[in-house]
C-alpha cells in the first residue's frame, strides 16, 4: 500500500470518528489521496461519468424516488392500509399482520424502506396503539417490516448493484420476490406468537360488501406495482422506461383519482425528490472516488488473493460475507455499503462460483437489516421520532424480529435455488 493510501485511510477513520457526513468524509478521503499521490480530480470525474451515467440504469433511480414520493400521499396510504386490514385484520394480532402486509405491497410501489416507514409508519403505529398494542412493539413491527421496501421489487439498491456488477435488473427484481415473501411470513409468524402470548386483540371483521368497497378504492394504487413489474417482466419496457411510466401513473392517481396532491403538494414532491436525488448523487460521486483509489491501489486483487488463500470453501466465504454486511449495516448507509464494497468483492465471486444475481440478493438483504439494528438503525429512529416512543424500548422489541430475518437470510444464502428459481423460470 502506498503512503497516499495509508494517509487517505487515516483521514477516513478520522471523519468517521468525528461523525462528519459520510459522503463528505469519502470526498475528503479522495482529495487527500489525490493530493499526496499527484492525481487529478478530473480523472475520477471522467471515470465516474463513463462508468455510471453513460448507461440508462442509473436514470431509473430518480424516477423511482419520484414515484415513491408521489405514492406517499395520505389518501393512498390510507386506502392501502384499509385494503390490508380487510385481508388479514380479523385475526388475533391482526393489526400487526396488516402492518407487515402493507409494507410488502407498498414495497412494490416505492422500493424504499424510508418511504415506507415515513409514509405508512404513522398510520400503522397509531392504529396499533389505538387497539391496545404496546407502543414499542408497534414501532418495532413498523421498522422491521419497512426493510421489505428494497428487497421486494422494484429496488433502488438492486439498481445500484446492477449498475456496478452488470447483473440483469429484471433477474434481480425477480430474485427478490421469494426472499421478501419469506421475510414477511417470518415477521407475521413472530407477530402471531407475540399476539397470543400477550393477548393482543382481534381486528375488525369486514363484511363482503365492506371488503369490496375498500378493495375498489385501493385498486388504482395496487395497479402501480403491476405496471412497474409487468412492463419489465414481459419485456415491453426497460426498467428505466417502466420507472418513468410508473412515475407518470403515480402522479395521475395522486392528482386525478385520489385528489390527494394539488399543485402545492406537487411542488413539494418535486423538491423532496430533487433533494433525495442530490443526496444519492453525492454518495455515488464520493464512492466513485474511493472506487478509483481501490482500483489504482489494486485493493480488490489483494483482497481476492487473501480470501482465496485463506478461505477454502464457498459456504465459509458466504458466511463471512453475511457477517461483514450485517456489521457494516449497523454503522453505514446502505447505498454507501453497496457502492464502496461491491467492487472489492465482485472479482472473488467467480473464484467461488457464486451467481451474481444470488450475491446481489444476499447483499441487499444483508445491508437492509442494518436499518433496524443499533446504533445506525434509521428505520427505528424514524418510528421513535414520529411516535415519541423511547428508542431503547423499540430496539429491545425489534431484536427478535431481526433474528427472524437473519434466519431467512441464512436460508436464502445457503439455498440459492430459493432465490434463483423465479428468474430461471422466466428468463430461461
Image (spheres, helix red, strand yellow):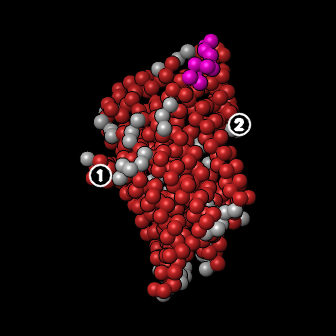
Task: Count residues near mark 2 (Cα–Cα under 10 Å), then give few for <14, some for 14-19, many for 20+.
Answer: few
- Name the mark nearer the viewer: 2 or 1: 1
The rendered magenta stretch, by its main secondary structure, is classed as helix
Residue at the extreme left of the image, as rendered:
428
The kind of secondary structure element at disc 1 is: helix
Disc 2 from disc 1: Cα separation: 45 Å
Q: Is residue 393 left or right of residue 156?
A: right
Task: State the residue at coordinates (36%, 39%).
Answer: 356
Earlier-in-chain disc, 2 versus 1: 2
The kind of secondary structure element at disc 2 is: loop
Front residue (pair 58, 258): 258
- Give x and y (percent) for residue 6: 59, 20
Task: State the residue at coordinates (45%, 58%).
Answer: 227
Front residue (pair 391, 91): 91
Check the image and report above or below for 21 versus 380.
above
Q: Is residue 81 left or right of residue 389?
A: left
Task: State the residue at coordinates (66%, 21%).
Answer: 32
Asked if residue 379 lies in the magenta stretch, the reply is: no
Q: Which residues are drawn in magenta?
A: 37-46
Residue at the extreme top of the image, as rendered:
38
Q: How many marks?
A: 2
- Give x and y (percent) for residue 307: 39, 30
Q: Can you identify the residue that label 1 sits on?
A: 426
- Label placed on residue 331: none
Task: Count residues near mark 1 (Cα–Cα under 10 Å), then give few for <14, some for 14-19, many for 20+.
Answer: few
Q: Is residue 164 left or right of residue 380?
A: left
- Label placed on residue 20: 2
- Give x and y (percent) for residue 375: 62, 49
Residue at the extreme right of the image, as rendered:
264
- Give x and y (percent) for residue 116: 58, 59
Question: In this orientation, does residue 373 appear?
Answer: no
Amino acid at each position: 500500500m502506498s503512503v497516499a493510501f495509508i494517509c487517505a485511510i487515516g483521514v477516513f477513520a478520522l471523519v468517521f470518528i468525528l461523525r462528519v457526513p459520510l459522503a463528505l468524509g469519502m470526498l475528503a478521503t479522495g482529495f487527500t489521496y489525490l493530493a499526496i499521490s499527484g492525481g487529478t480530480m478530473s480523472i475520477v470525474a471522467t471515470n465516474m461519468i463513463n462508468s455510471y451515467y453513460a448507461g440508462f440504469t442509473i436514470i431509473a433511480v430518480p424516477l423511482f424516488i419520484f414515484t415513491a414520493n408521489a405514492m406517499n400521499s395520505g389518501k393512498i396510504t390510507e386506502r392501502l392500509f384499509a385494503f390490508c386490514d380487510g385481508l388479514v385484520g380479523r385475526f388475533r394480532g391482526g393489526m400487526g399482520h396488516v402492518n407487515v402486509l402493507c409494507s410488502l405491497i407498498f414495497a412494490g410501489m416505492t422500493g424504499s424502506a424510508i418511504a415506507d416507514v415515513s409514509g405508512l409508519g404513522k398510520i400503522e403505529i397509531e392504529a396499533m396503539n389505538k387497539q391496545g398494542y404496546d407502543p414499542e412493539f408497534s414501532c418495532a413491527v413498523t421498522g422491521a417490516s419497512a426493510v421489505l421496501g428494497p428487497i421486494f421489487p422494484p429496488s433502488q439498491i438492486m439498481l445500484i448493484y446492477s449498475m456496478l456488477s452488470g447483473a440483469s435488473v429484471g433477474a434481480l427484481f425477480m430474485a427478490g420476490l421469494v426472499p421478501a415473501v419469506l421475510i414477511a411470513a417470518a415477521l407475521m409468524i413472530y407477530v402471531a406468537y407475540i399476539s397470543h402470548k400477550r393477548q393482543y386483540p382481534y381486528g375488525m371483521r369486514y363484511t363482503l360488501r365492506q371488503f369490496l368497497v375498500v378493495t375498489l378504492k385501493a385498486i388504482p394504487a395496487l395497479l402501480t406495482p403491476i405496471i412497474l413489474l409487468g412492463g419489465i417482466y414481459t419485456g415491453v419496457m426497460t426498467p428505466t422506461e417502466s420507472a418513468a411510466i410508473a412515475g407518470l401513473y403515480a402522479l395521475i392517481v395522486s392528482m386525478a383519482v385520489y385528489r390527494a396532491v394539488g399543485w402545492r403538494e406537487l411542488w413539494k414532491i418535486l423538491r423532496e425528490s430533487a433533494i433525495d436525488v442530490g443526496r444519492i448523487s453525492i454518495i455515488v460521486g464520493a464512492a466513485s472516488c474511493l472506487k478509483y483509489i481501490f482500483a489504482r491501489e489494486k485493493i480488490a486483487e489483494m483482497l481476492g488473493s487473501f480470501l482465496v488463500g485463506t478461505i477454502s470453501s464457498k459456504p465459509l466465504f458466504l458466511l463471512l460475507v453475511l457477517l461483514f454486511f450485517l456489521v457494516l449495516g449497523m454503522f453505514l448507509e446502505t447505498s454507501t455499503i453497496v457502492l464502496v464494497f461491491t467492487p472489492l468483492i465482485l472479482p472473488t465471486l467467480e473464484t467461488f462460483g457464486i451467481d451474481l444475481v444470488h450475491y446481489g440478493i444476499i447483499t441487499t438483504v444483508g445491508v437492509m437489516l442494518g436499518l433496524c439494528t443499533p446504533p445506525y438503525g434509521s428505520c427505528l429512529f424514524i418510528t421513535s421520532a414520529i411516535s415519541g416512543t423511547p428508542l431503547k424500548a423499540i430496539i429491545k422489541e425489534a431484536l427478535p424480529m431481526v433474528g427472524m430475518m437473519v434466519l431467512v437470510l441464512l436460508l436464502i444464502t445457503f439455498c440459492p435455488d430459493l432465490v434463483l428459481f423465479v428468474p430461471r423460470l422466466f428468463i430461461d
